[in-house]
């Protein structure tokens, strides 16, 4: 099966969404999301982005489906045609009624590289729990270092399963984002300890232990 990853941006308390939207504007994080979900090791292959119905709805119509990636929307709806009409889901976007079903549908895509679960809360939760037999290799976590009012939260990360692999820090300037003048986004790459890829030694940066402590909902 293709490698499964999670990419998410969260506040210190694990907040990821508010009123069906992102609670912040972070162009730097958007660009990072695009770069990570677009890049593949082999030319001629594409990554898949798997998302819940509300995450699909939260993407502005002009940006969806997300270009250059295989889009898959999760919904328990038994009427796929009605769902496609109601949510504006075009034919080239896959629809699945479960995460396991999504993995199965994607396994028959010939040019598939990696799979990215891009939200929301239940898809993250399911992918991290391992209950469906899916092992999430890497969590790309952007820590938004200001607390924002949120109504959707990610589950805490299990620090016995994930270790910090890489840290990038991005400072957003006062002029660019007046409302978030003190906002700093940290991009974490967290490797699953149980995956076949051995994580490198901890760098002298905050470890996943700190991240896990800060993302509890
Ligand atoms: N900060 C971030 O990185 C990030 C990322 C993504 C989204 N968000 C934010 O999070 C919010 C949306 O997330 P959410 O958790 O509320 O909703 P969501 O997970 O995007 O969508 C929930 C819906 O998706 C379907 N679904 C999800 N998992 C499923 C599964 N395993 N099997 C079948 N159907 C499944 C169900 O649709 P039906 O009701 O049709 O059955 C469910 O009601 C928005 O505010 C968005 O902006 C933030």
Image (cartoon, grey):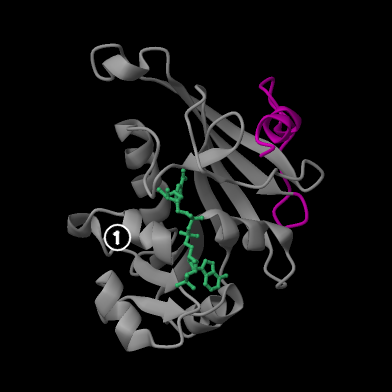
Residue where numbered disc 1 is placed: 66
Residue 192 in the figure: left or right of residue 32: right
Q: Which quadrant would residue 67 be assigned to in this image? A: bottom left
Percent position of residue 37, x then y: 41, 54
Q: Is residue 89 visible?
A: no
Query: Of helix, strand and loop, which mostly describes the magenta segment?
Result: loop
Q: Residue shown at 47%/74% (left/top)?
A: 75
Q: Quick one: SS at disc 1?
A: loop
Q: Relative to 63, is 166 on the left or the right?
A: right
**What residue lies at 72% left-to-right and 40% top-to-bottom?**
163
Give the position of the C terminus as an image quadrant: top right
Nearer to me, 150 or 196: 150
* 101 lies above or below 137: below
Q: Is residue 101 above or below residue 45?
A: below
User: In the rendered structure, which segment of residues is drawn in magenta?
Assistant: 193-217
Camera-side residue: 24 or 63?
24
Residue 120 is covered by the magenta coloring: no
The stretch drawn in magenta includes residue 203: yes
The picture quadrant where one finds residue 174 is top left
Determine the residue positioned at 48% across, 31% down: 149
Respond yes or no on whether mark 1 lies under 8 Å from ligand 1. no
- Name the quadrant containing residue 203: top right
Q: Is residue 41 above or below residue 85?
A: above
Q: Split into 4 quadrants, where in the image is the N terminus? A: bottom right
Q: Position of residue 13 (x, y in %)?
A: 61, 32
Q: Nearer the viewer, residue 208 or 167?
A: 208
Q: Position of residue 150 (x, y in %)?
A: 49, 37
Q: Is residue 126 left or right of residue 60?
A: right
In the image, what residue occupies the spot 41% across and 60% down?
54
Q: Is residue 66 visible?
A: yes
């Amino acid at each position: 099966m293709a490698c499964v990853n999670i990419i998410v941006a969260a506040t210190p308390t694990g907040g990821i969404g508010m009123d069906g939207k992102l609670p912040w504007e972070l162009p730097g994080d958007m660009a990072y999301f695009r770069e990570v979900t677009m890049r593949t090791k082999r030319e001629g292959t594409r990554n898949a982005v798997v998302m819940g119905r509300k995450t699909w709805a939260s993407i502005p119509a002009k940006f969806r489906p997300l270009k250059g990636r295989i889009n898959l929307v999760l919904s328990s709806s038994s009427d796929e045609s009605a769902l496609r009409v109601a949510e504006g889901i075009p034919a080239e976007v896959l629809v699945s009624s479960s995460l396991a079903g999504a993995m199965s549908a994607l396994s028959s895509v010939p040019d598939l590289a990696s799979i990215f679960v891009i939200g929301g809360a239940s898809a993250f939760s399911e992918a991290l729990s391992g209950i469906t037999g899916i092992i999430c290799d890497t969590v790309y976590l952007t820590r938004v270092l200001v607390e924002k009012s949120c109504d959707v939260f990610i589950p805490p990360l299990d620090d016995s399963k994930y270790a910090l692999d890489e840290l990038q820090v991005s400072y957003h300037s006062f002029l660019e984002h007046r409302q978030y003048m003190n906002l700093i986004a940290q991009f974490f790459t967290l490797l699953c300890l149980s995956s076949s890829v051995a994580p490198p030694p901890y760098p002298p940066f905050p470890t996943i232990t700190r991240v896990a402590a800060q993302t509890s909902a």
